[in-house]
Image (cartoon, helix red, strand yellow):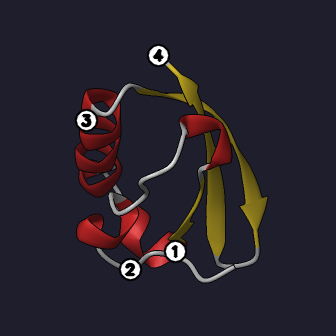
Amino acid sequence: MTPATTVEQALEHEGPASELRLAIADARLGAVGVNMAIVTDGLLTKGFMPDGFEEHDGFRVYKYTEL
């Protein structure tokens, strides 16, 4: 799994929320979480609700469900 390195890459998913496993590099999470706030806002407009995450070495994998 290759972590997304831009907000645009993170928002590219076209399938259902249950199929989205979004890998985000730790370097892109930022200290205040602005990038993830933008990603979350974009995914909420698609009808995706955050459903937890898994920690990995150097990145997190976020899971989603239908809103």
Circle 2 is placed at which residue position? 5
Mark 4 or 1, closer to the camera: 4
Query: Which badge, 4 or 2, comes first in the chain's sequence?
Result: 2
Relative image position of residue 15 (x, y in whole percent): 51, 49
Query: Which badge, 4 or 3, comes first in the chain's sequence?
Result: 3
Relative image position of residue 23 (x, y in whole percent): 58, 66
Circle 1 is placed at which residue position? 25
Query: Which badge, 4 or 1, comes first in the chain's sequence?
Result: 1
Mark 3 or 1, closer to the camera: 3
Q: Which element is circle 2 on?
A: loop
| C-alpha separation, residue under disc 3 versus residue under disc 1 | 18 Å
Mark 4 or 2, closer to the camera: 4
Q: Is residue 27 left or right of residue 21?
A: left
Mark 4 or 3, closer to the camera: 4
**Residue in the picture at 31% in, 49% down:** 39
**Badge 3: residue crowd in 10 Å (few <14, some 14–19, many ≥20):** some
Circle 3 is placed at which residue position? 41
What's the amino acid at mark 2? Thr
Query: Which badge, 2 or 1, comes first in the chain's sequence?
Result: 2
Circle 4 is placed at which residue position? 67
Out of 49 and 31, give the one closest to the viewer. 49
| C-alpha separation, residue under disc 4 versus residue under disc 2 | 25 Å
What's the amino acid at mark 1? Ala
What's the amino acid at mark 4? Leu
